[in-house]
Image (cartoon, rainbow, N blue to C red):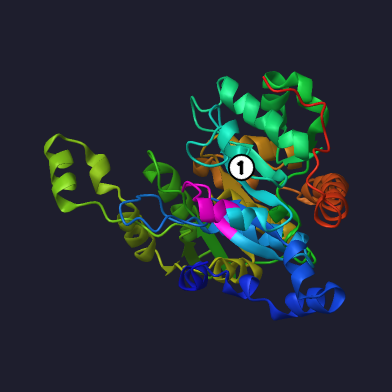
């Protein structure tokens, strides 16, 4: 594994956690500790291809860290990107561990394939259970209209080795039940691991205190300018004495000047509305700009904040896990699924003041209500797959489409 890449993504501490390694080695010996480990496929682990335009998303890092925490004391031995094909060497590494975890995010679309271009023949090379954990529907228009036959076959393949799979919201469950009714008994609604990642504190309603630090998150894809500037303007006016921070989960990518000029000549003002320009907009309204290549830095930012408002779903979920006030604005249907699960409002950025008195106790109750299902799923992974998996298919009832 590329140690420099791990360090840049803020995961080196997990890869080299000597305490966990020592515990496992003392308990079962060095050779057994490797056998009792697992691998992860995550969208947070990026391609090394300089031509890859996709930027690392801190929220995917939150998911990866939450998965690793919940599976302790078992160790993540290898990390692979969901955006890069697996090599023969990669597959050998996966097969050297006990289990392959697909770590969350909105990966489930009509053509979901675990790894780009993979089919069931390719997956046959992987001899250990492949386990989805906290995955959700893609949520963008046209991405969840009807599951392909190949994806249905892949899902059946996955469930021949793992009785259970973990899915993050009711909309995802609806999609699965509609497209794979014969497999419905194997899908668990667990929420996302990030919902349980924080150390819950005492919630103080906004009506009882003025926040000292307010963090705003933005999502700078498609037509984002109006939504995000409305949020920035609201925080600027509503909390004049607070420290205000704009948190960039994905570093802003500069658009080439030639492309911007070409757009402007065509009368397309959207080319003025860039992620970099949005940061400048926030700076002029008294915001600090926060950016980091380490997901842990973002987690610490939210731990220290009093209030979060914005369009980054996993910042919202982590703040809720901390029992902090957090308000999310709509980007796509991935927000709607969690809103159904936890019953928080999806805010109109033009009317944010109308939501500030929301009682979050219903969210805490719903987090606690779904936690036993996540605990049950994790216990299954530890007790049935990690502790005593013998490579035999454990669930023959899932039929290939």
Say which of 178 and 17 sits in front: 17
Q: Is 19 placed above or below 143 here? A: below
Residue 59 screen position, x and y as percent: 56, 55
Residue identified by numbered label 1: 125
Magenta stretch contains residue 80: yes
Residue 274 screen position, x and y as percent: 30, 50
Q: Is 326 placed above or below 227 here? A: below
Give the secondary structure at mark 1.
Answer: loop
Say which of 336 and 398 sits in front: 398
What residue appears at the point 48 percent right and 40 percent down from the top-left corner?
116
Residue 19 vs residue 284: left or right?
A: right
Residue 266 vs residue 86: left or right?
A: left
What residue appears at the point 75 percent right and 80 percent down from the top-left corner?
19
Residues rendered magenta in the picture: 79-91
Say which of 272 and 19 sits in front: 19
User: From this viewpoint, which residue is outermost toward the left?
Assistant: 265
The quarter of the picture where the C terminus appears is top right
Residue 86 screen position, x and y as percent: 51, 48
Can you tell which quarter of the image residue 253 is in? Answer: bottom left
Say which of 130 and 137 sits in front: 130
- Disc 1 crowd rating (10 Å Cα; few below 14, some 14-19, many 20+) is few
Residue 138 vs residue 31: left or right?
A: left
Residue 315: in sight, yes or no?
Answer: no
Q: Is 343 placed above or below 359 here? A: above
Magenta stretch contains residue 266: no
């Amino acid at each position: 594994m590329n140690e420099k890449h791990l360090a840049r993504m803020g995961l080196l501490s997990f890869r080299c956690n000597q305490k966990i390694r020592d515990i496992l080695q003392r308990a079962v010996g060095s050779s057994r500790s490797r056998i009792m480990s697992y691998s992860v496929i995550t969208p947070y682990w990026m391609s090394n291809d300089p031509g890859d335009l996709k930027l690392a998303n801190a929220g995917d890092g939150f998911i990866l860290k939450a998965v690793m925490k919940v599976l302790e004391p078992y160790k993540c031995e290898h990390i692979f990107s969901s955006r890069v094909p697996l090599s023969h060497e990669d597959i050998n590494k996966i097969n050297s561990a006990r289990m392959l975890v697909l770590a969350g995010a909105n990966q489930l679309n009509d053509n979901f394939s675990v790894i780009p271009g993979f089919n069931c023949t390719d997956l046959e090379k992987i001899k250990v259970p492949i386990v989805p954990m906290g995955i959700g529907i893609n949520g963008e228009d046209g991405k969840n209209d009807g599951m392909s036959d190949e994806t249905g076959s892949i899902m059946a393949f996955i469930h021949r080795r793992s009785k259970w799979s973990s899915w993050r919201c009711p909309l995802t469950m609806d999609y699965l039940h509609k497209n794979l009714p014969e497999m419905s008994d194997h899908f668990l609604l667990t929420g996302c691991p990030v919902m349980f990642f924080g150390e819950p504190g005492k919630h103080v309603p906004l009506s009882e205190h003025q926040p000292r630090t307010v963090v705003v998150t933005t999502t700078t894809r498609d037509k984002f300018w109006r939504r995000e500037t409305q949020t920035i303007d609201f925080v600027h006016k509503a909390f004049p004495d607070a420290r205000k921070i704009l948190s960039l989960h994905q570093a802003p990518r500069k658009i080439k000047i030639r492309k911007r000029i070409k757009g402007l000549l065509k009368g397309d003002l959207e080319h003025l509305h860039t992620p970099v320009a949005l940061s400048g907009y926030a700076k002029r309204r008294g915001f600090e700009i926060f950016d980091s290549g380490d997901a842990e830095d973002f987690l610490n930012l939210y731990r220290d904040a009093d209030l979060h408002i914005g369009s980054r779903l996993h910042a919202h979920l982590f703040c809720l896990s901390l029992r902090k006030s957090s308000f999310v604005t709509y980007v796509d249907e991935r927000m709607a699924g969690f809103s159904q699960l936890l019953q928080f409002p999806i805010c109109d950025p033009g009317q944010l003041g109308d939501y500030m008195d929301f009682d979050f106790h219903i969210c805490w109750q719903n987090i606690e209500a779904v936690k036993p299902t996540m605990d049950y799923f994790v216990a299954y992974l530890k007790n049935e797959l990690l502790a005593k998996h013998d490579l035999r298919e454990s669930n023959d009832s899932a039929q290939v489409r």
